[in-house]
Image (tube, helix red, strand yellow):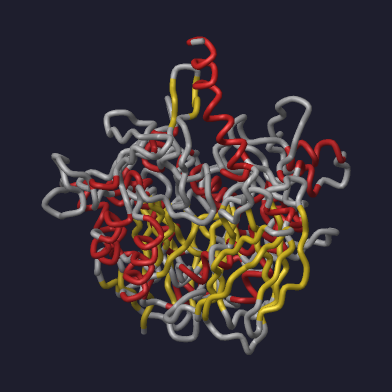
């Protein structure tokens, strides 16, 4: 008898679960709300709950019409197609589902569109600052960890788990960012990563502290501050005249995502007979000789065994992700999107998603991460001038070609195809792009070795690289901490290039957010970036003017940024000796100018015929009469 009762005790949760599963209900509707007044009148609701797919649905609200219902393969899902007329008013209505004598309902809200700036875009006039929120600053220690989440740890002594940084910490240091000259903030993803620790290496488990392992598209991680914390950040940024960039991931989600555990359709994810990773070889997309097999492995292969690959050809999933992008843009007043792992996504989906965003927010900027090594590959993923069957509509992209060239130029000796010739040659391919000014340039990011370590801790090279970034074409972006000489490589793990910003966390012995907390070298670096970034901000010739450059000679590289009002000369001496640069061959751009102001030293130069340029230095001269 005791054995029988014991078995019943063990089975009771499963028996009760089965009973609950048979009780019809609407547990969730995505998007969680919508708005009146959007240009696209169509809305598709994902409705989830036990037996949700067995119901017949109705909606009674002026201006809202239920067009059709689509059953999923999973009986707990149904997709409802609605139209929202231009005359619909803000308010709430009930989604009613009936099956015989069973009736279920769910309240749904149509909101007025949010006031204030949104969809402003970022441009070459901006200076984007990239932050990993978990590692920047902890403004609210009470939200570091929660017992109801799968990962309950926050421990700064362990590099590869959460450290406790949050959105309040970002807001606490906006004065610092604005002093530096920052105009836009891009953070690694803030959507919830409520997942168990993942095996990063045989001897190491990693948390989703970086944000790229989504588990719910409609929640901002409460360890960062939740939806309300993110809305507050957007408001504060816009009040200060700053812009907000959100990081999108369309390629994959965590295997702890609720829609992986409860899949509406068998093809919601790309499935393989056994685990198949992506080849990462984007050449298969534009190679005229490529096989369909290679394209499939690139696009449908998984990033890792714990990041299920989304099948963006499923029309319901595609609509789900597109509506989520619009939902975020509207609710959080976003100005731009950075798209993660761009080259791994279905090309037609990307164009459709980009167009949906740009239809609602015409000034919005979108720049994807296509980590490629040549200009043709990079141009393929953005608006371009290449005669190929597929034409991308992405306005911009991360400029990995110029990133590679910049680092090579700083590490190599000058030669026919080396040194500063690498920088020059990268820019000579700009004719491939519809608008190279919309490319986002960078010296490093959260996935690369840190810039200072790449260039061998050479401060002269650091200043040259920073000067190029802030004076050439494109939209410059900056990785947190480089202005105070943070450095490291990805060995033994990515966490090494994602260390905490000193001074951002309670108990820090040093505070690099303040002048007093920085040493002389760090203050020199901070002030160098600050001076160039703020000069750039007020100099249209530098951020929006034309670019003319000259073939490098004897280790020197010279270019001009100019418009009708101003001409700025940038001259680099990459050699180890001071040179006297004869300027006669630059007469096309220098004719009529008799003096110059050195922007970095404030020195006035009265003889422009021959310029003294110290070893390993890039000078920035504003020409005058």
Q: Nearer the viewer, residue 21 or 462?
A: 21
- Who's the residue at 64% across and 51% down the image? 24
Residue 165: percent from left, percent from top: 30, 47
- Who's the residue at 57% across and 62% down the image? 439
Residue 322: percent from left, percent from top: 65, 62
- Does 270 appear above or below 475? above
- Who's the residue at 49% across and 86% down the image? 564
Q: Residue furthest left?
A: 516
- Does 152 appear above or below 402? above
Q: Nearer the viewer, residue 334 or 577?
A: 334
Q: Is residue 617 left or right of residue 196?
A: left
- Who's the residue at 40% across and 39% down the image? 149
Residue 60: percent from left, percent from top: 65, 78
Q: Residue furthest bottom?
A: 87
Q: How many marks?
A: 0
Any part of residue 588 in sight: no
Q: Is residue 373 left or right of residue 285?
A: left
Q: Quadrant of the C terminus?
A: bottom left
Any part of residue 126 in sight: yes
- Does 528 appear above or below 561? above
- Does 530 appear above or below 595? above
Q: Is residue 297 left or right of residue 576?
A: right
Q: Nearer the viewer, residue 289 or 163?
A: 163
Residue 275: percent from left, percent from top: 70, 27
Q: Nearer the viewer, residue 363 or 616?
A: 363
């Amino acid at each position: 008898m005791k054995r029988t009762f014991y078995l019943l005790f063990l089975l009771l949760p499963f028996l009760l679960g089965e009973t609950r599963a048979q009780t019809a209900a609407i547990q969730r509707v995505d998007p969680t709300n919508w708005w009146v007044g959007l240009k696209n009148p169509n809305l598709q609701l994902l409705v989830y709950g036990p037996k949700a797919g067995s119901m017949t649905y109705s909606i009674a609200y002026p201006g809202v019409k239920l067009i059709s219902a689509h059953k999923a393969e999973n009986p707990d899902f149904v997709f409802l197609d609605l139209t929202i007329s231009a005359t619909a008013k803000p308010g709430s209505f009930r989604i009613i589902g009936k099956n015989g004598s069973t009736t279920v309902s769910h309240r749904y809200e149509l909101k007025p569109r949010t006031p204030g700036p949104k969809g402003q875009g970022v441009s070459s006039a901006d200076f984007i600052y990239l932050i990993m929120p978990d590692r920047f600053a902890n403004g609210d220690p009470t939200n570091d960890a929660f017992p109801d989440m799968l990962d309950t740890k926050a421990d700064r002594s362990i590099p590869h788990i959460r450290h406790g940084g949050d959105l309040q910490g970002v807001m606490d240091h906006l004065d610092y960012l604005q002093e530096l000259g920052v105009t836009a903030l891009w953070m690694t993803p803030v959507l919830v990563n409520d997942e168990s620790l993942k095996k990063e290496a045989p001897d190491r488990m990693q948390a989703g502290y970086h944000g790229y392992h989504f588990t719910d598209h409609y929640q901002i991680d409460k360890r960062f501050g939740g939806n309300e914390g993110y809305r507050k950040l957007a408001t504060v940024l816009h009040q200060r005249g700053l812009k907000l960039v959100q990081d999108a991931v369309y390629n994959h989600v965590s295997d702890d995502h609720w829609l992986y555990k409860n899949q509406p359709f068998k093809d919601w994810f790309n499935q393989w007979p056994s685990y198949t990773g992506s080849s990462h070889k984007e050449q298969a997309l534009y190679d005229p000789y490529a096989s369909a097999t290679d394209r499939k492995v690139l696009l449908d292969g998984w990033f890792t065994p714990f990041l299920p690959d989304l099948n963006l050809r499923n029309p319901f999933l595609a609509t789900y992700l597109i509506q989520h992008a619009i939902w975020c843009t509207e609710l959080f007043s976003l100005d731009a999107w950075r798209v993660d792992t761009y080259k791994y996504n279905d090309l037609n989906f990307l164009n459709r998603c980009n167009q949906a965003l740009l239809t609602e927010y015409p000034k919005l900027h979108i720049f994807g991460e296509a980590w490629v090594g040549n200009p043709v590959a990079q141009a393929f993923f953005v608006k371009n001038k290449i005669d190929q069957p597929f034409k991308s509509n992405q306005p911009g992209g991360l400029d990995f070609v110029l990133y590679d060239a910049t680092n090579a130029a700083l590490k190599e000796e000058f030669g026919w195809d080396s040194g500063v010739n690498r920088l020059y040659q990268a820019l000579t391919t700009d004719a491939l792009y519809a608008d190279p000014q919309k490319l986002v340039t960078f010296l490093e990011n959260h996935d690369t070795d840190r810039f200072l370590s790449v260039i061998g801790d050479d401060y002269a090279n650091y200043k040259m690289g920073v000067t190029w970034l802030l004076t050439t074409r494109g939209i410059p972006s900056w990785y947190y901490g480089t202005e105070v000489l943070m450095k490291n490589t990805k060995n033994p793990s990515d966490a090494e290039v994602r260390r905490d910003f000193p001074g951002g966390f309670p108990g820090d012995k040093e505070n690099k957010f303040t002048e007093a907390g920085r040493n002389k070298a760090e203050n020199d670096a901070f002030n160098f970036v600050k001076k160039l970034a703020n000069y750039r901000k007020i100099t249209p010739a530098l951020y929006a003017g034309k670019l003319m450059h000259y073939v490098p000679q004897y280790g020197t590289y010279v270019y001009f940024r100019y418009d009708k009002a101003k001409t700025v000369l940038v001259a680099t001496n990459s050699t180890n000796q001071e040179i006297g640069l004869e300027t006669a061959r630059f007469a096309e751009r220098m004719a009529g100018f008799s003096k110059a102001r050195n922007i970095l030293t404030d020195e006035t130069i009265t003889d422009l015929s021959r310029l003294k340029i110290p070893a390993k230095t890039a000078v920035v001269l504003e020409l005058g009469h």
